[in-house]
């Protein structure tokens, strides 16, 4: 049945509910997102500070982390506990509230990652 919907512009069905436009399956059973792997990158983790688009609030952004989504979420939790702040993971990018660049560079280096400080 899902082949019938694949490639169409159908986004909702009374049978399936919300439908993934990529694979045509119900969103809960979507296989597109599970197959989508993060690009390999160059093996360097970059840490930078951002304030743009955040209402003047500062966040520390960690990019270039390899591994599964679960591993990235676990690492984000450990980094948030280390900094004593909140944060989130969006598309494999870890955002930690506040300016913690130096602390995160030291922590990630201690965990055996090649880390560079990006930005100014």
Image: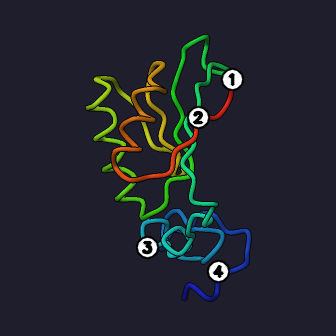
* Front tag of 1 and 4: 1
Residue 101's x, y, as percent? 49, 27
Q: Are marks 2 and 3 in contact (CB under 8 Å)?
A: no
Q: Are marks 1 and 4 in contact (CB under 8 Å)?
A: no
Q: CA distance from mark 1 to mark 3?
A: 43 Å
- Residue in the foreground of this view, choosing between 110 and 68: 110
Q: Which residue is mark 4?
A: 5
Q: Which residue is mark 2?
A: 117
Q: Which residue is mark 1?
A: 120
Query: Element type at marker 4?
Result: helix
Q: Earlier in the sequence, mark 2 or mark 3?
A: 3
Q: What mark, if any, has residue 4 been given in the picture? A: none
Q: Which residue is rendered at x = 50% and y = 76% of the image? A: 31
- Residue 5, compared with residue 20, is above or below; it is below
Residue 60's x, y, as percent? 51, 28
Q: Which residue is mark 3?
A: 29
In terms of image quadrants, where is residue 29?
bottom left
């Amino acid at each position: 049945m899902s082949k019938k919907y694949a490639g169409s512009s159908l986004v909702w069905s009374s049978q399936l509910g919300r439908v993934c436009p990529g694979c045509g399956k119900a969103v809960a059973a979507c296989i597109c997102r599970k197959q989508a792997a993060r690009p390999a990158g160059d093996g360097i983790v970059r840490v930078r500070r951002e304030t743009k688009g955040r209402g003047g609030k500062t966040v520390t952004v960690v990019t270039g982390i390899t591994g599964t989504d679960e591993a990235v979420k676990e690492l984000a939790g450990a980094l948030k506990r280390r900094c004593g702040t909140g944060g989130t993971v969006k598309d494999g990018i870890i955002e930690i509230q506040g300016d913690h660049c130096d602390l995160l560079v030291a922590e990630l280096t201690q965990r055996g990652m090649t880390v560079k400080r990006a930005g100014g």
